[in-house]
Amino acid sequence: MFDIQEIRSQFSILDQKVNGKPLVYLDNAATSQKPDSVLTTWERYYKEINANVHRGIHTLSQLATEEMELSRRKIQKFINAKHDFEVIFTKGTTEGLNLISYILTQKLKKDDEIIISYLEHHSNIVPWQLLCERTGAKLKVIPIDEQGILQLDVFDSFLSEKTKVVSVNHVSNALGIVNPIEEIIAKTRKNTDAYIVIDGAQSAPHFVIDVQKMDCDFYVFSGHKMYAPMGTGILYGKQHILEGLPPFHGGGEMIATCSFDGTTYAGLPFKYEAGTPNVGGNIALGAAVDFILRVGQENIQKHENALLEYAQRKLLELDGIKIYGEKANRTGVVSFNLEGVGIASDVGMILDKLGIAVRTGHHCTQPIMDFFNIAGTVRASFAVYNEFHEIDLLVEGVKKAQKMLS
Ligand code: C6P
């Protein structure tokens, strides 16, 4: 039974007024709110078992270690990784992508090629540009059509023995477009021996993820977009690949032995988890996975898709609205502009006065904005606790903005 009021009751932050109006939170692609179960798990860690992990024989350290490792196993199941040690705790997607691009440095040489797409977040562009600077490799970018859909025939023409990395997002944060990663992965495997990296920041909160079925080499996501605290995230990597690559950060926890003559490294996952981790956050990420599984991933997807379909239909009833990627396969995001209203942030400010939180601007995807020749969009993005009447309020707010600004 999908009971939206029962779900909302778990998010006390939603029950407040902003600028004198009931809060309508539609900025979930930036970060989702956190249910009570996640917050109490986090609080309980600090109130009852706070200690450093993997280091002490004392009771609290052992309890903290057990809980963090239990959380790792929950995440392993959540993404269907083969082994728990293939699940690395990170600060988020950005750190995961930087880690991967760094540890691949020795595997690339001048004139090798890295393929990304036009739809990438800056986090999946800049680390690869840095890798190109370090190695002399070249970046190839899969173009999009006017609907924002990736042009796979061009991708086909890019694939060659020079291709060493293919890194694309599963879902675009700016437009909500669901990319055909199954096809991209299959084509890459068939034609190259490239590493395949999937940015799952906008898919892990919404879809059932099966990294074994997907057959990617790396899959990264952020906890804070899927009901967990900020500063949490996951890097999944296949065992044999991670074992064959060098560490990222050096420090405590990631060594087997350390002397002035040299250092040997710990096995997975610790080789990639130098320093004291975000123990409370990592444990709370496990609680967020529990929350998602309790609600049911199918229920979440069905509800969010219904919200998207309703939002798009209602917005398109307005005159002079342009939805980017209107006809593309999308999830959880509607990104739009109003004709004659040059600046998306003006619309965002008017919506904020009405208690409606949306994101405006380039959404850390400037190439997409350049493609559409715009400075930014208004983006409404949905989570499991959003209601249909909130979409009505959004549409009313947009109408008001249209009147005030044109
Ligand atoms: N997108 C948004 O409002 P971090 O900041 O490390 O948690 O995630 C980076 C990132 C990487 N890839 C994609 C597809 C993303 O959506 C994000 C974060 C937020 O769209 C903040 S810019």
Image (spheres, rainbow, N blue to C red):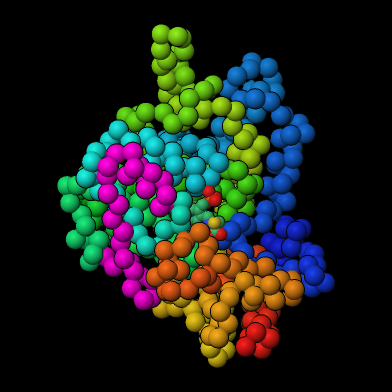
Q: Position of residue 13 (x, y in %)?
A: 75, 59
At x 39%, y 37%, the residue is 102
The C terminus - image quarter: bottom right
Determine which quarter of the picture holds residue 232.
Answer: top right
Left or right of 158, for residue 267 = right
Q: Is residue 13 above or below residue 236?
A: below
The N terminus - image quarter: bottom right
User: In this figure, what is the number of numbered marks?
Assistant: 0
Q: Position of residue 215 (x, y in %)?
A: 32, 48
Task: Decide if residue 388 is in sight here.
Answer: no
At x 46%, y 57%, the residue is 121
At x 48%, y 25%, the residue is 250
Left or right of 273, for residue 359 = right
Q: Position of residue 81 (x, y in %)?
A: 42, 42
Q: Is residue 230 above or below residue 257?
A: below
Task: Decide if residue 249 is in sight here.
Answer: yes
